[in-house]
Image: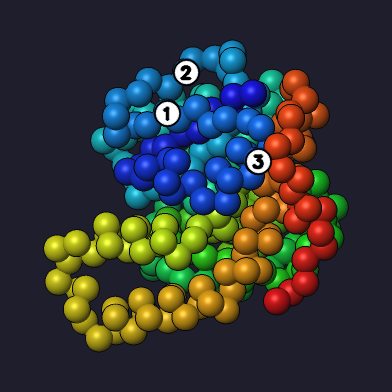
Amino acid sequence: MRILAIMAGGMDGPVESGCIGEVVAERGATLHWCYRRLGHPLPETTTGYAALIVFGGEPSVYDPALRDYFEALAALIRRFHGEGKPVLGSCLGCQAIAFAFGARVYPAGLLEYGFTPLTLSAQAQADPLLHGIAPVQTLFEMHADTFDLPDGAVPLLEGETVRNQGFRLGDSTWGVQCHFEVTPTIVDTWTTRELIGNPAHDQPQVQQRLRLVHEDFGRYQEAQTRFARVLVGRWMDRVQAHGVPIHRTTQVQARTRLLSGS
């Protein structure tokens, strides 16, 4: 079973998809990568794909130079959604889903970088992906844009500084602002990429922030990984329910486990 994986930024999908890629592989499905930076054309139909994942990246959906690309991506997202094929978006992918359904995406006024407490909404307790999960999750963020909720969206995750952090549309499309899928190695790669040649790299406050992120991985990574595996595992259940059954090469026990708050 193939899942279309959109990479609008500069990331290397197999290396930087983290827990999302791991769980998809464990469930016997494959990610079919479509890279903007390599000039891959976006498919015009959903034919041949059971679902769609839109990953994060550094571009902004409102960048005039990328208008045609994100308009085409928006149409593709709406097509999957309209056919009831599951859609999942992380960070930029979440913003792209909001944009696809007419919501405003705009600068947040800050870089939200590091582990951030996010609160599950009351509606999340009945959500197919988030039910039974502890009401506060501390998850990794790395973004400078935010979004308004599309009409009809069910809010699922909220932050204190940046309010809108996750939502569901209908019963098949989810957007999550945070990078719940990451590992310390992935974040090191992103941080290095952002700071190469940047004079701010050696500033004491920047170095302190980087040290804090490394320390926070020790505090929060185990719980974040549990959260990620539950969320993606349950999303894969939706993929399986909509399409051909997936052969499970590994039993993902975490997806049915109720998470503690730690």
Residue at the (64%, 55%) spot, across then down: 228
* In the depicted structure, whether residue 138 falls above or below residue 43: below
Residue 6, image x and y in percent? 46, 34
Disc 1 secondary structure class:
strand
Residue at the (37%, 31%) spot, across then down: 35
**Is the N terminus in the top left, top right, bottom left or bottom right quadrant?**
top right
User: Mark 2, residues whose alpha carbon is within 10 Å: few (<14), some, or many (≥20)?
Assistant: few
In whole angstroms, how far apart are the C-alphas of marks 2 and 3?
Answer: 26 Å
Residue 36, image x and y in percent? 34, 31
Residue 114, image x and y in percent? 46, 71
Amino acid type assigned to the residue bearing label 1 in the image = Cys
User: Mark 1, residues whose alpha carbon is within 10 Å: few (<14), some, or many (≥20)?
Assistant: some
Amino acid type assigned to the residue bearing label 2 in the image = Pro
Residue at the (58%, 46%) spot, across then down: 22
Which residue lies under the disc numbered 3?
26
- Which numbered dot is residue 43? 2
Disc 2 secondary structure class:
loop
Which residue lies under the disc numbered 1?
34
Amino acid type assigned to the residue bearing label 3 in the image = Glu
Of 71 and 141, which appears nearest the observer?
141
Image depth: mark 3 or mark 1 in front: 3
In whole angstroms, how far apart are the C-alphas of marks 3 and 1?
Answer: 21 Å
* In the depicted structure, whether residue 193 falls above or below residue 62: below
- Pick whichever of labels 2 and 3 is earlier in the sequence: 3
Image depth: mark 1 or mark 2 in front: 1
Proximity of marks 1 and 2: CB atoms separated by less than 8 Å: yes
User: Mark 3, residues whose alpha carbon is within 10 Å: few (<14), some, or many (≥20)?
Assistant: some
Tell me if I can see residue 254 in this picture: yes
Residue 85, image x and y in percent? 68, 26
